[in-house]
Image (cartoon, rainbow, N blue to C red):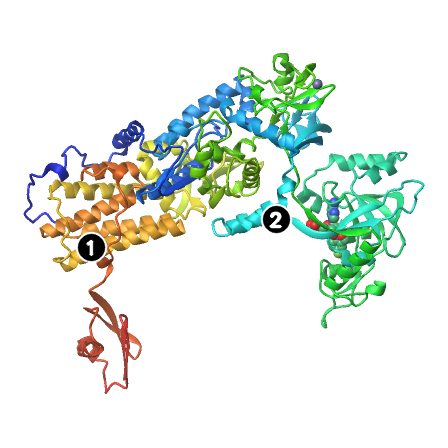
């Protein structure tokens, strides 16, 4: 407690005097709106398009305007804001923007459900959520806000599309989509439920339609290589996910000549990473869509039916891996490139048309899928690798797993290649194939080109014109943007743009004849691939980005978002950065130097189960908990009927488990500062955070204690004087040490480790030390003041409203402040605690000067009564570990 007993001046110097009007009780709702208005009026967080001096660009993934903020948003934006505010306190100019990823399917679904135009729905949601975000107290430059559904934004997306199309980086090809025959519309994957259309319930068909593709595979190698540049700043897990998605594989293409040149002339090309096993190939398998399969099916209805069956199935690789292996012989044969033996060609459902050449040489002895298939259809299995070690059993087709995939061991049953190991066999077989022009080395990527056409209304119009005589013609630059009409209410039966001649009727820029505008729109991942660059100069009308602005601000120093975006969004954004670089509009190779992926927000779940097994989930807000002494929940009741409900454990907040907690209600009840402190204190940012009412209340109590400490101090009306470092009491020295240790720790925790939780814990400790400190002199007043102001400044990134209001009582303006510097002299200790042991057992503790000599320390230790009673004879050994302990051995 701050001591009341001393005499204090009623100082005439009014600069640092308390203004008396401050409420003795902490009332977040009374201060937060005022502080937010102050920031807005003074435009405290506004930054210029260009910047000199130390600066930083901090970006949290922008939200989809779904309607209301959820806890995931609040966590994401709080983390970004704490980092932003911390760096501002370090004297850096910080760009923290906010905007809206505003195109997308939910707006169309809402339109169908409520007969409201997607544009109207979207902008209403934006208005509501913007207000919610502002109430969180984010240090955002709101003048940079934009929504991606505005022509000012998508104009430049269309412009880039046209440039890339002209360069050949965008092309058009047929692609299979889900078609709802009743609604006459294309369905997104998530609109297909158990093979049926979500609205019509009709069986979904596959259709081939032309779509535009970005040639991301041209950048596959670079996207892979540049991950090395991100090694230091990105989570390993995300780098690995990116690598696996790109999926580089080093193998060879092998040609199998036709055994029936009269039926078909071409060679069949397969892709393999295991050229060493070529002599074990016993059949060849092709995908159902492979030209050879189609050729074989020409006069064979049974094969046609099988191909159709394969086409209806899932195209997801993961599904194929576990699906039952199915196949059918085509009746065609190819020749083994080295032995000339005739091998049958099968159609197999485990071969993907989209990978390699859509054909594999099957080596059942050493490949799991081929083995399963060969067993099922009685195809020969030929061992060609002897991977046996001393203890292993002989090769045996029922224990094939031991032999699968192994690159160890020497070749057998492989004629001239017998005895070679993997590397030698691979090289020798490749050389022999190359000599006969039947094989070549080949790098293959799992990554596919990115199909961006969507047969939907609420998206960026693809800036292309279809002309009967000229084909696909890009919209001329001076006609951009192609504006999406906004007064449209889709009814679910296809893309409304197809029913709007005023939109699609146009003239061909090439021949001037009648032409039809493309009515497909772009995948919404396109907008989120370059928004980070647009934030540097959001109002620029002369191009995608203002060159000097992106030079100033890019790359993003710190990107923060959910791990669910670890693959596609980040890969597309990295790809776009390279596209824009090659277009000459941005510099550097990568958009995001550091990445923080935040963990999920979990909450308790509660349910009741009916006899039928149907579960009804209850929101935690409607449930009353009974806890044991340790605070663990032991039973729960529904508040409305007082009857018990089952405690289902902590799960990710979601609609399906009805365990979402509305952040708005927390902000209203406790204030934004409490919500922020709780979120940052409850868990490290990359780990999952367990929502708990007790935790929220704890955070609120901490802020109340800070408030009381400061108002208590202010009541004394102490004079503001400088700390005199030469006349400090021991207690004052201790408090100063604690203050400066905390400054050091908080800085390190936040900047180096993202350890916001331990940074707050350190501040709580400092608060305790200040509370215990008794002010007994004028210098003590200064020491207490220094500790309080330091605490408030360090707390500001977490609880900015409270900090600003309390600092103002010291006539300090938070928005102009810097983090206090660590005073190294305050860190040095004058005394230290030494542990005294006898025969290794702790017997006493001793406070001594840090510079005490070894002899003095030993003598002191030996004279302690607690020690002496154990010194039964002369000491045999005296061990001194400096600054730590003395051990006397008797
Ligand atoms: C012969 C072989 C023998 C294979 C063996 C594997 C093990 P990654 O590493 O992922 O690139 N493959 C090639 N094209 C395919 C396609 N379109 N659909 C399904 N599978 C395909 O995988 C390359 C391996 O996957 C290739 O090497 C091929 O099977 C198969 F003991 O060829 B392998
Ligand atoms: Zn034309």
- Return the mark for residue 832: none
Residue 2 shows in this picture? no
Give the numbered dot on residue 735: 1
Report x, y in % for residue 438: 83, 51
Q: Residue at x 69, y 52 (%)?
A: 250
- Residue occupying the point 6% across, 44% down: 9
Horizontally, residue 392 falls left or right of residue 790, namely right
Where residue 145 appears, as percent x and y from the top left, is: 42, 28
| Residue 462 horizontal/vertical position (percent) | 61, 25
Residue 865 figure quarter: bottom left
Residue in the picture at 40% in, 47% down: 683
- Give the structural element (helix, strand or loop) at label 1: helix
Question: Taking 773 as reference, is 120 above or below it?
Answer: above
Left or right: residue 876 compared with residue 693: left
Query: Which corner quadrant holds the C terminus?
Result: bottom left
Left or right placement of residue 201 versus residue 641 in this view: right
Counting from the top left corner in percent of width and height, residue 176 is at 71, 31
- Cα separation, mark 1 vs mark 2, equals 52 Å
Point out the frontmost of discs 1 and 2.
2
**Disc 2: CA contacts within 10 A as few (<14), some (14-19) or many (>=20):** some
| Residue for badge 2 | 244
User: Which of the two residues, 673 or 126, is positioned nearer the viewer here?
Assistant: 126
User: Dot 1: few (<14), some (14–19), or many (≥20) neighbours within 10 Å?
Assistant: many
For image coordinates 56% across by 40% down, the residue present is: 578
């Amino acid at each position: 407690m701050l001591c009341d007993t001393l005499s204090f001046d009623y100082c005439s110097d009014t600069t640092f005097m308390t203004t008396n009007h401050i409420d003795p009780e902490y009332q977040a709702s009374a201060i937060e709106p005022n502080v937010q208005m102050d920031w807005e009026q003074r435009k405290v967080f506004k930054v210029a398009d260009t910047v000199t001096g130390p600066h930083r660009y901090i970006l949290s993934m922008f939200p989809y305007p779904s309607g209301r903020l959820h806890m995931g948003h609040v966590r994401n934006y709080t983390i970004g804001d704490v980092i932003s505010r911390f760096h501002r306190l370090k004297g850096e100019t910080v760009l923290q923007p906010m905007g809206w990823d505003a195109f997308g399917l939910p707006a169309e679904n809402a339109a169908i459900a409520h007969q409201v135009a997607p544009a109207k729905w979207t902008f209403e949601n934006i208005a509501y959520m913007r207000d919610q975000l502002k109430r969180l107290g984010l240090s955002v430059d709101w003048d940079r806000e934009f929504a991606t559904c505005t022509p000012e934004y998508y104009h430049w997306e269309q412009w880039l599309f046209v440039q890339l199309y002209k360069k050949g980086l965008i092309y058009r090809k047929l692609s299979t989509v889900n078609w709802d025959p009743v609604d006459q519309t294309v369905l997104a994957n998530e609109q297909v439920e158990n093979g049926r259309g979500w609205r019509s319930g009709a069986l979904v068909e596959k259709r081939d339609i032309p779509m535009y593709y970005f040639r991301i595979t041209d950048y596959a190698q670079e996207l892979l290589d540049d991950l090395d540049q991100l090694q230091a700043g990105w989570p390993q897990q995300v780098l690995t996910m990116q690598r696996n998605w790109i999926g580089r594989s080093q193998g060879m293409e092998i040609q199998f000549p036709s055994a029936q040149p009269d039926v078909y002339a071409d060679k069949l090309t397969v892709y393999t990473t295991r050229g060493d096993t070529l002599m074990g190939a016993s059949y060849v398998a092709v995908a159902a869509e492979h030209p050879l399969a189609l050729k074989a099916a020409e006069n064979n209805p049974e094969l046609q039916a099988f191909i159709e069956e394969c086409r209806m199935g899932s195209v997801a690789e993961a599904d194929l891996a576990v699906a039952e292996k199915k196949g059918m012989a085509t009746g065609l044969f190819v020749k083994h490139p080295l032995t000339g033996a005739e091998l049958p060609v099968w159609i197999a459902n485990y071969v993907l048309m989209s990978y390699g050449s859509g054909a594999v040489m099957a080596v059942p002895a050493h490949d799991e899928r081929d083995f399963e298939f060969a067993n099922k259809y009685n195809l020969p299995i030929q061992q060609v690798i002897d991977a046996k070690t001393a203890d292993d059993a002989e090769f045996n087709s029922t224990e094939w797993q031991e032999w699968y995939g192994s690159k160890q061991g020497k070749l057998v049953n492989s004629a001239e290649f017998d005895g070679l190991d993997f590397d030698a066999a691979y090289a020798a077989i490749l050389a022999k194939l190359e000599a006969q022009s039947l094989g070549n080395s080949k790098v293959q990527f799992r990554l596919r080109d990115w199909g961006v056409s969507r047969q939907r209304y609420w998206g960026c119009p693809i800036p292309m014109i279809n002309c009967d005589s000229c084909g696909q013609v890009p919209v001329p630059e001076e006609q951009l943007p192609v504006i999406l009409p906004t007064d449209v209410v889709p009814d679910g039966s296809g893309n409304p743009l197809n029913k709007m001649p005023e939109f699609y009727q146009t003239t061909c820029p090439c021949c001037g004849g009648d032409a039809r505008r493309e009515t497909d729109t772009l995948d919404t991942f396109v907008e989120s691939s370059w928004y980070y660059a647009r934030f540097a100069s959001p109002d620029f009308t002369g191009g995608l980005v203002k060159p000097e602005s992106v030079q100033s601000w890019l790359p993003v120093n710190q990107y923060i978002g959910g791990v669910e975006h670890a693959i596609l969004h980040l890969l597309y954004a990295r790809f776009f950065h390279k596209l824009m670089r090659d277009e000459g509009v941005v510099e550097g190779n990568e958009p995001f130097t550091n990445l923080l992926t935040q963990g999920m927000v979990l909450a308790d779940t509660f349910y009741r189960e009916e006899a039928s097994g149907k579960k009804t989930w209850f929101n935690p807000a409607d449930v009353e908990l009974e806890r044991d002494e340790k605070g663990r929940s032991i039973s729960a009741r529904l508040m409305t009927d007082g009857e018990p409900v089952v405690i289902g454990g902590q799960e990710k907040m979601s609609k399906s488990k009805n365990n979402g907690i509305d952040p708005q209600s927390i902000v209203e009840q406790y204030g934004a500062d409490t919500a922020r402190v709780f979120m940052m204190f409850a868990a490290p940012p990359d780990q999952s955070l367990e929502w708990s009412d007790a935790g929220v209340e704890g955070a609120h109590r901490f802020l109340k204690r800070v408030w009381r400490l400061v108002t208590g101090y202010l009541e004394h009306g102490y004079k503001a004087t400088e700390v005199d470092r030469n006349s400090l009491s021991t207690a004052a020295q201790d408090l100063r040490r604690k203050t400066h240790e905390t400054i050091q720790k908080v800085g390190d925790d936040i900047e180096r480790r993202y350890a916001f939780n331990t940074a707050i814990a350190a501040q709580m400790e400092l608060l305790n030390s200040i509370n215990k400190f008794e002010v007994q002199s004028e210098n003590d007043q200064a020491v207490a003041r220094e500790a309080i102001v330091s605490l408030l400044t360090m707390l500001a990134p977490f609880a900015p409203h409270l900090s600003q209001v309390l600092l103002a009582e010291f006539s300090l303006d938070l928005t102009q402040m810097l983090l206090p510097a660590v005073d190294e002299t305050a860190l040095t200790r004058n005394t230290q605690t030494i542990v005294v042991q006898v025969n290794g057992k702790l017997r006493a503790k001793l406070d001594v000067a840090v510079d005490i000599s070894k002899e003095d320390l030993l003598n002191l230790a030996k004279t302690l009564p607690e020690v002496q009673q154990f010194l039964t004879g002369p000491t045999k050994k005296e061990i001194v570990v400096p600054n730590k302990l003395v051990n006397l051995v008797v």
